[in-house]
Image (tube, rainbow, N blue to C red):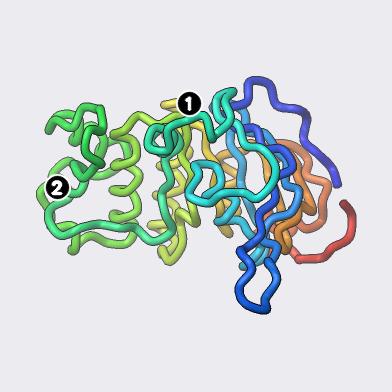
Amino acid sequence: MAAPPPPGDQLFEVEHLSLASVASGDQPPARILKDVSFGVERGGALVLVGPSGSGKSTLLRCLNRLAEPTAGHVRFDGRDLHSLDPRDLRRRAALVMQTPVLFDGTVRDNLRVRPVGTPGDFSDARLTSAVVEVGLDARLLDRDAATLSGGEKKRVTIARALLRDPQALLLDEPTSALDPPNAALVVETVSRLRERRRLTIVAVTHQPELVRQLGGCLLYLVRGEVLAYERADGAVSDARLQAFLAGGRAAPGTDRR
């Protein structure tokens, strides 16, 4: 298995992470992730790819303690995750879920939803800036959130995360269920935010165009194990990653480690 060059200033450092489900009755613990290690540079990108059920979304959730590994270590900004307040960690490493979650009310109402005591500027001017930053018209603030298209909902959830000034965005299938034009808009938005804000991006995707625009590194998981880990902004040597970047699904094979 080829490995990318060691990153410089790492925002995320993951070492020998494993996760198993809790035993239930006669069922032994099931392995979900096994001995996963990688780093993500500050302002860099990592894209997680692989077959459905390979542990990609679970790994993403381990980065802000929505899932807890059973072995190994995860550090964020030089500190072990367990030394950080979970609420502060989830502000700084904001997860945008696969299915956008919006509540009853206007877009403005939704952008102001936050845990009690959350710091930040949620003024009208700041809300306007956030929606424009994700490529939406400011007039959308007064729309009923239920009337938005899938692509608009996705970008509103990204804008909501941005209002808390994160250092990293964790994106779970950001283009899932979107038609090609809306998927392209979301890809463009994420790429632009990374450059403009120097955000660190970790994304689960089946969309090769997101990888092509973000660059960074690719990590290929099968049944919870890393089978390939390479830089995406150079010549990719692994055949599975080549197939993915060419627009097909990477073959799940278990050769070459």
Name the amino acid type tagged 2.
Answer: Asp
Q: Secondary structure at mark 2?
A: helix
Residue 41 percent location from the top left of the image: 62, 28
Name the amino acid type tagged 1.
Answer: Arg
The part of the image, by quadrant, that contains residue 101 is: bottom left
What label does residue 198 carry, if any?
Answer: 1
Q: Which tag, 2 or 1, sits closer to the chain's start? A: 2
Which is nearer the eye, 46 or 33? 33
Q: CA distance from mark 2 to mark 1?
A: 28 Å
Q: Would residue 230 be found to the left or right of residue 62 on screen?
A: right
The part of the image, by quadrant, that contains residue 159 is: top left
Which is nearer the eye, 257 or 125? 257
Observer able to see residue 140: no
Q: Secondary structure at mark 1?
A: loop
- Residue name at image x 69 percent, y 46 percent: 71
Observer able to see residue 16: yes
Q: Would residue 25 be found to the left or right of residue 129 on screen?
A: right
Q: Which residue is the site of mark 2? A: 109
* Mark 2 Cα shell of 10 Å, populated few (<14), some (14-19), many (≥20): some
Q: Residue furthest top?
A: 9
